[in-house]
């Protein structure tokens, strides 16, 4: 029997139906990543599992017990499921260690000393034992989320639920938190993780759920979902999140916004510092020193320069596709672009571009490593 079985789960609000008809099973020890577009019911699904949201209809069986039954002992069943929220949900008026001690003492009757000792062990596991006597507001976002994970483990749950645990964090903090979640996956804990971190979903999951329009549209191994999805919607979503796209529509583009978007993409893909920097340098130099420079000289107000960056398996190199149809149509040649670059730009690009070519449609293909 599956540890969790969801049958025809439906959740309605006034005028909105975030969950239409969800059916799923989760076996003990599985790590399920739940992906899909925003607003498709992923967080509602997670919150229904431990009855933070009350389903309109359907069944949620956990260890054979229907969480939706009128006579279900919710406090007892919730002890089997730890929950980690995207906004940490720590008690700011209590020390870090006290946040971890409360539930075991209040619900399990654990002694203060035993709860304290367990809290220290859990904080050690997430790398924060030295922060035990700190206040939550003294910690970074990544540290607070790691404390929240430790707190979720304090009741020794069979299942741990994560509702977009990295959505409020900057790229460095995302890596901290995902490292802890990955280590938990290696310990065999049953976990369901609503996430937009595709590299984590691909590398740490046993299965991936793709949700769309309030339903579970596709379920499979990471390899099936990311390499051979069966539905068009899944293919479109996976392609979109695994690629970075940007378009320059002015000779005075917003380079800081472009750089910030690119950094966020590289962080989601778990790229190392070297490749992240190489991608940034390549795109900045090609944009500012070549393409935009030539467009400005030619008085092409809207150059329509389109970038598409994708990352190879293992994160060792990246492929950059550049569409310069507007410049080409205006008569800009490869020689003109080469002449626009100064010696410094040439040297930078030669050091980070390992291969380059032009396809039949005139698009530039560059491999960055």
Image (cartoon, helix red, strand yellow):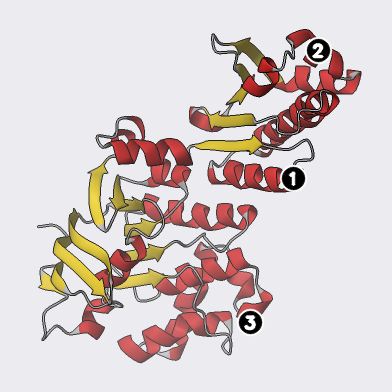
Residue 215 at x, y percent in the picture: 23, 55
Residue 29 is labelled as none
Q: Quadrant of residue 351?
A: top right
Q: Secondary structure at mark 2?
A: helix
Frontmost of labels 2 and 3 is: 2
Viewer-proximal residue among 343 and 98: 343
Q: Would residue 258 be found to the left or right of residue 285 on screen?
A: left
**Circle 2 is placed at which residue position?**
336
Q: Is residue 339 above or below residue 310?
A: above
Q: Residues within 10 Å of mark 3 (few under 14, many from 20)?
A: some
Residue 15 at x, y percent in the picture: 28, 73
Q: Quadrant of residue 280?
A: top right
Are dots 3 and 1 in contact, CB under 8 Å? no
Residue 144 at x, y percent in the picture: 57, 71
Name the residue at 22% across, 83% down.
Answer: 74
Q: Is residue 107 above or below residue 176?
A: below
Q: Earlier in the sequence, mark 2 or mark 3?
A: 3
Name the residue at 73% across, 38% down.
Answer: 250
Cα distance between the residues tagged 2 and 3: 60 Å
**Circle 1 is placed at which residue position?**
254
Cα distance between the residues tagged 2 and 1: 24 Å
Viewer-proximal residue among 128 and 92: 92
Q: Check the picture and name the quadrant holding the N terminus.
A: bottom left
Q: Would residue 44 be found to the left or right of residue 72 on screen?
A: right
Q: Would residue 11 be found to the left or right of residue 46 on screen?
A: left
Residue 259 at x, y percent in the picture: 70, 43
Q: Would residue 92 be found to the left or right of residue 343 on screen?
A: left
Q: Is residue 96 above or below residue 290?
A: below
Frontmost of labels 3 and 1 is: 1
**Circle 3 is placed at which residue position?**
135
Is residue 109 shown to the viewer in this render? Answer: no
């Amino acid at each position: 029997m599956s540890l969790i079985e969801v049958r025809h789960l439906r959740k309605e609000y006034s005028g909105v139906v975030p969950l239409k008809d969800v059916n799923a099973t989760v076996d003990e020890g599985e790590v399920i990543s739940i992906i899909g577009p925003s607003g498709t019911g992923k967080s509602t699904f997670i919150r229904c599992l431990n009855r933070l949201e009350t389903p309109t209809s359907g069944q949620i069986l956990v260890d054979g017990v229907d969480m939706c039954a009128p006579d279900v002992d919710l406090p007892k069943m919730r002890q089997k499921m730890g929950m980690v929220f995207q906004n940490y949900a720590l008690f700011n008026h209590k020390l870090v260690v006290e946040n971890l001690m409360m539930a075991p003492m209040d619900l399990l009757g654990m002694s203060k000393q035993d709860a304290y000792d367990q809290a220290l062990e859990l904080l050690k596991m997430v790398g924060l034992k030295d922060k035990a006597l700190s206040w939550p507001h003294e910690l970074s976002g990544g540290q607070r989320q790691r404390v929240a994970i430790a707190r979720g483990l304090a009741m020794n749950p069979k299942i741990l639920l994560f509702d977009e645990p990295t959505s409020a964090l900057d790229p460095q903090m995302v890596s901290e938190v995902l490292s802890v979640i990955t280590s938990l996956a290696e310990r065999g804990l049953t976990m369901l993780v609503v996430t937009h971190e595709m590299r984590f979903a691909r590398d740490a999951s046993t299965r991936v759920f793709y949700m769309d329009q309030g339903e579970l549209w596709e379920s499979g191994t990471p390899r099936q979902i990311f390499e051979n999805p069966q539905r068009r919607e899944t293919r479109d979503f996976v392609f979109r999140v695994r690629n970075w796209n940007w378009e320059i529509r002015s000779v005075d583009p917003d380079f800081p916004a472009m750089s910030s978007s690119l950094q966020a993409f590289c962080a989601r893909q778990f790229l190392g510092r070297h490749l992240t920097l190489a991608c940034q340098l390549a795109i900045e130099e090609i944009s500012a020193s070549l393409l935009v420079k030539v467009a400005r000289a030619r008085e092409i107000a809207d150059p329509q320069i389109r970038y598409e960056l994708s990352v190879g398996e293992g994160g060792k190199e990246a492929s950059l596709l550049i569409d310069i149809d507007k410049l080409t149509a205006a008569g800009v040649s490869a020689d003109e672009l080469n002449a626009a670059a100064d010696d410094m730009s040439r040297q930078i690009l030669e050091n980070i571009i390992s291969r380059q070519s032009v396809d039949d449609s005139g698009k530039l293909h560059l491999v960055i490593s």
